[in-house]
Image (tube, rainbow, N blue to C red):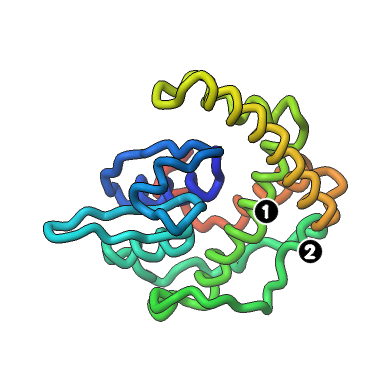
Amino acid sequence: SCPFCRKARSVLDYCRVPYNVVEVNPLSKAELKEVAPDYKKVPVLAVEGPADTVQVRDSKAIVQAVLTAVNAGSSGGPSKRPPVIPATAAMWPSKETEAMGAYLDSLSEVEREWILWTDRVLVQLIVVNIYRNLSESSETFDYLLTHPAFSMFWKYAGHASGTVVMNAVAMIRKRKFGLADERQALYDTLNAFVECLEGDFLGGSK
């Protein structure tokens, strides 16, 4: 249900990098203690090597690491800048910069903006939409109720607490960004995003 985890998995899928998913208990975080005992957030990418395991934390760092490893750097890149619509103006200070590591050296200014736009606009809109009310927030956490690795207690405790907490997070972010209609803001942003695409999306015609 975590949009940042989905982003990390998307770049792995796009680059055809095989991986295993370890579902983390949203309350105990027990699974994280095995690989990152000093870290309490997801996603975490653990790359097993012949001698040791390399760990990459944070979705943005994972995207950069994977693209660098498979040599999927800039090939001209997009020419259009990320869309800015009135509803999301508070999310997107386009002149603001952010430290993103050495991977930036291979990217154009427009590509850097797209990476930042994904976190600051698209992911934020997804969060305020999938958790926008208790019913939809509960539906997002339904996967916990059938997860074979969690006990009955953790399933229902994680489902109940996740539903309430993330609904509160969504409401706070909705007020923070001044979103009158979060669903329409998401639709308008995705339509603007599609207009920025050049050629077939990911090489396909549909």
Labels 2 and 1: the sequence-earlier one:
2
Which residue sits at x=80%, y=44%? 171
Residue 93 visible (yes or no)? yes
Q: Nearer the viewer, residue 154 or 172?
A: 154
Tag 2, which secondary structure? helix
From mark 2 to mark 1, how far is it between C-alphas?
Answer: 16 Å
Q: What residue is shown with label 1?
A: 192
Q: Nearer the viewer, residue 197 or 138?
A: 138
Q: Is residue 28 above or below residue 38?
A: above
Residue 191 visible (yes or no)? no
Circle nearer the viewer, 2 or 1: 2
111 with respect to 35 (left or right) = right
Whole-percent x and y of residue 124?
A: 67, 52
Q: Nearer the viewer, residue 196 or 141?
A: 141
Marker count (numbered): 2
The crowd level at tag 1 (other Cα within 10 Å; few <14, some 14-19, many 20+) is some
Which residue sits at x=70%, y=37%? 131
Report the amino acid beneath label 2.
Ala
206 with respect to 156 (left or right) = left
Q: Is residue 191 above or below residue 49?
A: above
Q: What residue is shown with label 2?
A: 90
Which residue sits at x=35%, y=64%? 65
